Amino acid sequence: MKISMFHLMPYRDLPADFEKRYNSVWVDPPYWELADSTKIGQYYNWTLDELIHAANRGIDGICVNEHHQNAYGFMPNPDLMGSVLARATNGTHVAVVQMGSTLPTSNPPIRVAEEYSMIDCISGGRLVAGMPLGTSQDVNLCYGISPIEQRERYYEAHDLILKAWTAREIFAWNGKYFKLPMVNIWPRPIQKPFPPVWIPGSGSLSTWDFSARNDHCYCFLSYWGNNFGKRVMDGWWDFVAKGNHDPNPFRAGFLQLVAVSETDASAEKEYYPHIRYFYDKCLHIQPEYFPVAGNQDYKSLVNSVTKLNPQMFDLMNKIPTWGYKDFVENQFVIAGSPATVRQQLMEAVKKLRVGNLMVLLHIGSMPHDLTIKNIDLFCREVMPHFCDVWEDQWENKWWPEKLRARPNGKGASARA
């Protein structure tokens, strides 16, 4: 299987009483009261250093993403980060996973096609092209896209980008939302016909349908752990079966928070304050800022309201009373000694049937040196045990072709 380090890049120094004094971490947190641009410059550089460090320690991929107007994760343009990472990791065997540029807010969308092409060229063909629909907070509230238009814009942008990458002739695009008289982008990706496409989602039926119909990798990005994640991924796999698609585990991805220390006890001591910070402050979001009316189509809304939201809101309401043990037992975080993390992470991977795992190795307010320690322990003591999972039966068609074979031999022996 392939494992990538996912980085949100949250503000690491919010006040202790942030969630009591302020309305939300997303959309309306007051910058001039809370933020220091000099600190933020340090955060950006730490984030890049941490991802490059993971690449140098042998991780398979490094992920960045796009969000706006928040202290939860503020990379307004992930392609700026991705271009630095592409250049800095040349000569390594790591994929640059853009999870990624939000399509409905990119106007015209060929800007995404151009920037992703640049990253693929700079990296020598190591790009994974994430194509998120975007959150309601970012797309509707921060960037002003009407909720009812969001998905239509997304579909049209996706089709335009793929055609811009592959068309041999100049073409005109006369869509509902985008009208371009002469499309002829420079550059085009090295990967042909185009880089592997990953679609991040949160359990929408329409996103499952779109991902399967276009043969893209569906990735469930959740902070509610793999027990809740199983409910979503089971729905995805049922959908795959009904559509007569093969159950290749590599057509699925999942995000898991992971913290590794020398012992289970030292993991609690080192990481619990930062886990607490992440769930108390980084996810302090007003409920009305979650899907704005019209953001979901009806069938997805029904599925969310009846099957997903009750369990998710029940878990969210319990979090303020939880201790470290509860976060671990509910699998929100897989944390502990290398042996503990290996055992629990392997159970999660098999349970969810995912071939592309994303691990959040920086959590909340974790300082730079502790993040580096977490990366080192994970890459040295945990990751080598996962290299061969699924690979004896399935091909990862959703990974850059030049990176599919392990360097210097096969499986765990290549990393040990």
Image (cartoon, grey):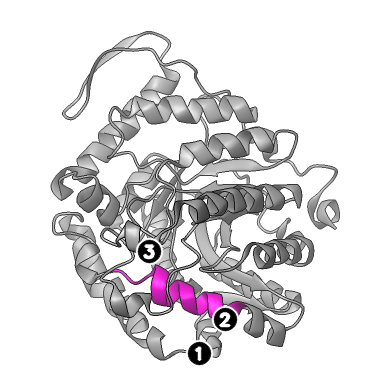
The residue identified by callout 2 is: 272
Residue at x 46%, y 28% (from the top left corner): 115
The crowd level at tag 3 (other Cα within 10 Å; few <14, some 14-19, many 20+) is: some
Left of 38 or right of it: where is 58?
A: right
* Up/down of 194 relative to 18, above or below: above
Q: Is residue 284 magenta?
A: yes
Asked whether the beta carbons under mark 2 and mark 1 sit within 8 Å of each other, the answer is: yes
Residue holding disc 1: 323
Q: Residue at x 37, y 22 (%)?
A: 163
Residues rendered magenta in the picture: 271-285
In the picture shown, does residue 358 fall above or below 162? below
The amino acid at mark 3 is Leu
322 over 19 or under it: above or below: below
Separation of disc 3 and disc 1 at Cα? 27 Å
Residue under the point 65% across and 49% down: 49
Q: Amino acid at mark 2?
A: Tyr
Q: Position of residue 9 (x, y in %)?
A: 50, 56
Q: Earlier in the sequence, mark 2 or mark 1?
A: 2
Rendering quarter of residue 383 = bottom right
Q: Residue furthest top?
A: 169
Q: Which residue is mark 3?
A: 34
The nearer-to-camera label among 2 and 3 is: 3
Q: What SS does tag 1 mark?
A: loop
Quarter of the picture holding the C terminus: bottom right
Q: Secondary structure at mark 2?
A: helix
Magenta stretch prevailing secondary structure: helix
How many residues crowd around disc 2 within 10 Å: few (fewer than 14), some, or many (20 or more)? Answer: many
